[in-house]
Image (cartoon, rainbow, N blue to C red):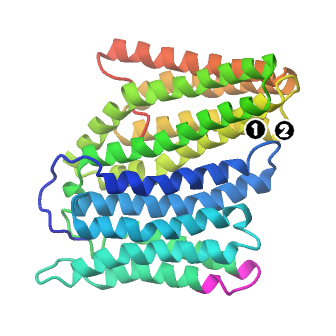
C-alpha cells in the first residue's frame, strides 16, 4: 500500500495509540481468564481462535499508523473508531465460540472497516500508487465475511471466520498492488516500541494474575508460589526489555536495509503472536499455582506452564533466525530450553507441589537468562532478539 511518506523517520508512539491499547488490556485479561484452573484442549484452541483475529487487527493498525504517522489526525480518528469494535470482541470473548459468537464477529468486522477508511481515503488521492481494489479486498471483503458469519448458524460461521482470516494472510503475502517502497518506509523505532508496549500488556496481565490470586489465597505456600511466579515474569521482562528491544531494532533495520520483506513481515505480524501467547498461558498457569500451591498442577495448568515457556523461547529463536542469526548461534542458547522443559520442568509439574513446579520454571528462565548474557559477552553484543 502507498502512503504520503516517502522516507522512514524516527517516531514514537502517540498517546492515541497508548489509549487504544487500553482496550487490549481488557481483551487479554478476559481471554487469560479462560485458561485458569484446568483448561482442556478445547480451551487452548478457543484461546487461539479468539486471540489471533484480534492480534491481527492490532498488528494491521500498528503498521497502518506507522506508515501514516501517529500524528496524522485521520490515523488518530481510526484508532478511536476501532476501539468499540475491539471492546465488543472482548465483551463477547467469554462465550466467543458460543452464544456471543455473533457479537465477536461484528466486532471483528467493525475493526476492519475502521482500517479500510484510512486506506481507501489514501487510494483516492490524485497520483496515489495504491489501487482501490487492494484495501477493498484486504479490509472490506473480510469485514463482509465476518458480518455475514454473525447470522450463519453452526459450523458454517467458523468456516467464514477461517476464510476471512485466510484472505488477509494471503493478501499480505501477495504483493501485487503494494508499491515497492512500502517496507522501506516503515519506522523501525515505532514498530519496536509498539510491539514492546503490547508485551507490557501481557506481562502486566501476568503480574496482575499473580497478585490478585494471592489476595484471594493469602497463605504462606501461596505467597511462595507468587514470589517464584514473579521471578518467572521478571526474568522474561528483563531479557525482553534490556536486550530484546535493541536486538529487534537492529534486526529490523538490517532486514529493511536488505529489503528482506519476508523477515519484516514474519517478525512484525506472525511471530510476536506466538511470543505473547506464550506469556499469556504462563500467566494462567501461575494463577492456578498460587491458588492451589500444595497440590500438583492439574494437567491443563501443567501444559500451560511448560508450553508457554517453550513457546516464548521458540518464538525468540525463530525471530533471531529470521533476522539472519546463524543456526549454530541460535541453537547454542535455545536448545537448553526444550531440554530443561522436558527434562526438569515437566517432571516437576507432574510430581511436585505447584509452588515447587513454579520454582523449577523460575530456575529454567534464570538459566536461559544466564546463557543469553554469556553469549552476549562472548559475541560482544546484545543477546538474541526477544521480539519482532
Residue under the point 55% across and 64% down: 87
Q: Are marks 2 and 1 in contact (CB under 8 Å)?
A: yes
Above or below 343: residue 179: below
Is residue 154 on the magenta stretch? yes
The residue range painted magenta reads 148-156
Residue 88, image quadrant: bottom right
Q: Callout 2: few (<14), some (14-19), or many (20+) C-alpha neighbours within 10 Å? A: some
Residue 386, image quadrant: top left
Q: Secondary structure at mark 2?
A: helix
Q: Position of residue 176 (x, y in %)?
A: 30, 75
Q: How far separated are the C-alphas under marks 2 and 1?
A: 6 Å
- In the picture provided, is 380 more to the left or to the right than 351? left
Tell which of 266 and 277 is nearer to you: 277
> Quadrant location of the C terminus?
top left
- In the picture provided, is 378 more to the left or to the right than 350? left
Q: List the residue tagged with mark 1.
A: 303
- Does residue 388 appear in the picture of this structure? no
Q: Callout 1: few (<14), some (14-19), or many (20+) C-alpha neighbours within 10 Å? A: many
Residue under the point 18% across and 62% down: 181
Q: Secondary structure at mark 1?
A: helix
Q: Position of residue 185 (x, y in %)?
A: 19, 57
Above or below 359: residue 300: below
Q: Which mark is residue 7?
A: none
Is residue 340 on the magenta stretch? no
> Quadrant location of the N terminus?
bottom left
Q: Position of residue 171 (x, y in %)?
A: 41, 72
Q: List the residue tagged with mark 2.
A: 299
Tell which of 52 and 339 is nearer to you: 52
Residue under the point 14% across and 63% down: 5
Residue under the point 42% across and 25% down: 329
Amino acid at each position: 500500500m502507498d502512503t504520503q511518506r516517502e522516507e522512514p523517520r524516527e517516531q514514537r508512539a502517540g498517546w492515541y495509540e497508548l489509549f487504544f491499547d487500553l482496550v487490549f488490556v481488557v481483551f487479554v485479561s478476559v481471554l487469560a481468564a479462560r485458561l485458569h484452573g484446568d483448561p482442556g484442549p478445547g480451551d487452548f484452541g478457543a484461546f487461539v481462535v479468539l486471540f489471533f483475529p484480534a492480534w491481527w487487527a492490532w498488528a494491521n493498525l500498528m503498521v497502518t499508523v506507522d506508515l501514516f504517522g501517529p500524528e496524522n489526525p485521520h490515523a488518530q480518528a481510526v484508532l478511536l473508531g476501532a476501539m468499540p469494535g475491539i471492546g465488543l470482541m472482548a465483551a463477547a470473548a467469554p462465550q466467543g465460540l458460543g452464544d456471543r459468537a455473533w457479537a465477536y464477529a461484528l466486532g471483528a468486522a467493525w475493526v476492519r472497516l475502521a482500517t479500510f477508511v484510512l486506506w481507501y481515503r489514501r487510494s483516492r488521492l490524485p497520483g496515489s500508487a495504491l489501487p482501490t481494489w487492494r484495501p477493498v479486498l484486504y479490509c472490506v471483503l473480510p469485514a463482509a465475511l465476518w458480518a455475514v458469519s454473525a447470522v450463519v448458524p453452526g459450523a458454517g460461521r467458523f468456516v467464514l471466520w477461517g476464510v476471512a482470516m485466510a484472505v488477509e494472510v494471503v493478501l499480505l503475502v501477495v504483493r501485487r498492488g503494494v508499491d515497492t517502497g512500502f517496507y522501506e518506509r516503515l519506522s523501525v523505532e515505532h514498530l519496536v516500541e509498539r510491539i514492546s508496549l503490547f508485551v507490557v500488556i501481557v506481562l502486566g496481565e501476568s503480574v496482575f494474575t499473580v497478585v490478585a490470586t494471592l489476595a484471594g489465597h493469602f497463605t504462606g505456600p501461596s505467597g511462595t508460589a507468587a514470589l517464584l511466579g514473579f521471578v518467572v515474569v521478571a526474568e522474561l521482562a528483563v531479557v525482553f526489555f534490556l536486550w530484546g528491544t535493541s536486538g529487534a531494532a537492529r534486526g529490523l533495520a538490517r532486514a529493511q536495509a536488505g529489503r528482506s520483506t519476508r523477515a519484516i513481515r514474519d517478525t512484525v505480524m506472525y511471530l510476536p503472536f506466538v511470543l505473547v501467547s506464550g506469556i499469556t498461558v504462563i500467566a494462567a498457569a501461575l494463577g492456578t499455582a498460587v491458588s492451589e500451591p500444595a497440590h500438583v498442577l492439574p494437567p491443563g495448568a501443567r501444559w500451560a506452564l511448560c508450553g508457554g515457556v517453550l513457546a516464548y523461547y521458540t518464538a525468540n529463536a525463530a525471530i533471531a533466525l529470521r533476522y539472519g542469526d546463524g543456526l549454530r548461534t541460535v541453537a547454542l542458547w535455545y536448545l537448553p530450553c526444550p531440554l530443561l522443559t522436558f527434562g526438569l520442568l515437566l517432571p516437576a509439574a507432574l510430581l511436585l507441589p505447584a509452588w515447587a513446579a513454579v520454582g523449577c520454571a523460575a530456575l529454567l528462565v534464570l538459566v536461559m537468562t544466564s546463557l543469553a548474557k554469556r553469549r552476549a559477552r562472548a559475541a560482544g553484543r546484545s543477546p538474541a532478539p526477544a521480539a519482532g
